[in-house]
Structure formats: C-alpha cells, structure tokens
Image (cartoon, rainbow, N blue to C red):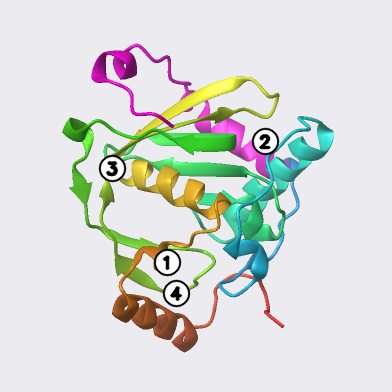
C-alpha cells in the first residue's frame, strides 16, 4: 500500500473496538468451540493465506471459534492459520499501553506504511501462541494502522498504539506467512526455538508430522 501523508492519516475514521469490549468478546467465545493451536513447522503457518471472499455464516462461526481458541490459549490475538484455516482473518482481545481493551476481527488486513515521523520503534519482548513458551525482543513501530473488512465485508480501519500496535502487526504478519521469529537474527531465532523445545505448551497444540 502506498504511503499516505499525515493529513490523510488524520482524516481516517477508525472503528470503535473499545465500546462493550468485554460483552462482545464473551458473546463470540460462548458461541465458539476452542480448537488446538498449530505450531512453527506446520505448512499452513509458512505461506500467504487466501483472501476472505465469502462473508457468511461459516466465516462468523470461524471467528467465534477463534475467540474461543484465543481465550483457551490465553492469547491477545489469533490468526486463522493458527488453528489450521487458510484464510486471511485475525481476531484480537488486547490492551493498549494505557490499559484500554480492544476487541475485534479483521479480514484481509493490510498494514499502512507509516510516515517517517510516526515510525518510533519499540523493542519490547514478543511471543507467539505458535511458538509456545518462547520470547524475544523485536523492534516494531509503536503505532500501527490496519485496513481490511469486518465479518460482514464492510471496509474498516483499525489503529493501535504500544502493545496493541505490536499485536496488529504480529497478526497481520501471520496471514502473509511470517512468524515473529522470522524477523529475528539467526542467533535469536535459534534461542527462541530452544526455549520452545524446553517448555511444555500450556494449551492444546497440533503436533507436526
């Protein structure tokens, strides 16, 4: 996506993903069925997912299942390929750095390229449900804008700061075939995989053949 200037960015109408966050997440989760998490090495995690083209009851059920799976794994974001589904959709239930809770789902997400003045890097630790038990420092911009569609196919724009910005970038990466460890140095990636090997997952995972 082409870079937009700051005036254009300021005029964007972002979705409200804060109001009734607790109730909306609970409703999704209660309708859903938790599924096991795919882990690094599973082919579905290492390729770009297919675009969502059918905004139907099947998609709605998938989103409900993703919220249920996310809660079981105690995550803050989950991409469809993390439960083995080859579609560009992710869900999130994430606090920003001010402690505000954001809940939503994005189909066919695309990250905006940020103007230079907004690219302030945060090198906090990052983890992933598909690399259970492992964490590593990874610099990412502390602000993110994601454009996509909601479960009904309507265009939406989501913005995040701090930890929530990291979540939006992390989940969008998933749908294009990238895990956070793919952005690490070889040494740090090796260390993350070692951490994973030394710890038992605290939630159900799909074993790799």
Q: Earlier in the sequence, mark 2 or mark 1?
A: 2
Q: Please tell me which residue is depicted at 35% across the width and 61% down the height of the picture.
A: 126
Is 103 magenta? The answer is: no
Q: Earlier in the sequence, mark 4 or mark 2?
A: 2
Q: Could you tell whether 137 is left or right of 91 in the image?
A: left
Q: Given this view, does label 3 or label 2 mark the residue nearer the observer? A: 3
**Residue 94 location in percent, x, y?**
44, 43
Within-10-Å neighbours for mark 1: few <14, some 14–19, many 20+: few
Residue bearing mark 2 = 27
Q: Residue furthest right?
A: 57
Q: Nearer the viewer, mark 1 or mark 3?
A: 1
Residue segment shown in magenta: 1-30
Q: Residue at x 41, y 74 (%)?
A: 134
> Does 130 sit left or right of 185 as displayed?
right
**Residue 160 % position (x, y):** 36, 34
Which of the two discs, 4 and 3, labels the residue nearer the N terminus? 4
Quarter of the picture containing the C terminus is bottom right
Nearest to viewer (mark 1 / mark 4):
1
Query: Helix or strand or loop: what does disc 2 sit on?
Result: helix
Q: What is the spatial separation of the Cα atoms under label 4 and label 2, in whole angstroms?
A: 29 Å
Q: Which residue is mark 3?
A: 162
Which of the pair 31/87 is nearer the observer? 87
Which of disc 4 and disc 1 is earlier in sequence? 4
Which mark lies nearer to you, 4 or 2?
Answer: 4
Residue 206 image position (x, y, % from top left)? 69, 73
Tell me the residue that label 1 is attached to.
Answer: 182
State how far apart marks 4 and 3 are (Cα).
22 Å
Q: Residue at x 43, y 80 (%)?
A: 193
Separation (CA) of disc 1 from disc 4: 16 Å
**Label drawn at residue 133:** 4
């Amino acid at each position: 996506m082409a870079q937009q200037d700051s005036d254009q960015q300021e005029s964007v109408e972002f979705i409200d993903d804060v109001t009734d966050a607790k109730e909306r997440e609970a409703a999704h989760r209660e309708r859903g069925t938790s599924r096991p998490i795919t882990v690094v090495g599973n082919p579905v995690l290492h390729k770009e997912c297919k675009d969502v083209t059918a905004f139907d009851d099947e998609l709605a059920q998938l989103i409900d299942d993703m919220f249920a799976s996310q809660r079981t794994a105690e995550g803050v974001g989950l991409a469809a390929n993390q439960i083995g589904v080859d579609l560009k959709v992710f869900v999130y239930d994430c606090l920003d750095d001010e402690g505000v809770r954001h809940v939503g789902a994005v189909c066919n997400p695309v990250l905006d390229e940020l103007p230079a003045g907004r690219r302030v890097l945060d090198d906090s630790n990052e983890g992933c449900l598909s690399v259970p038990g492992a964490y590593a420092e990874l610099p990412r911009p502390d602000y993110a804008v994601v454009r996509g569609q909601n479960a009904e196919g309507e265009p939406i724009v989501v913005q995040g700061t701090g930890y929530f910005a990291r979540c939006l970038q992390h989940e969008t990466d998933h749908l294009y075939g990238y895990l956070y460890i793919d952005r690490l140095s070889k040494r740090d990636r090796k260390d993350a995989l070692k951490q994973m090997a030394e710890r038992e997952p605290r939630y159900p995972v799909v074993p790799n053949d």
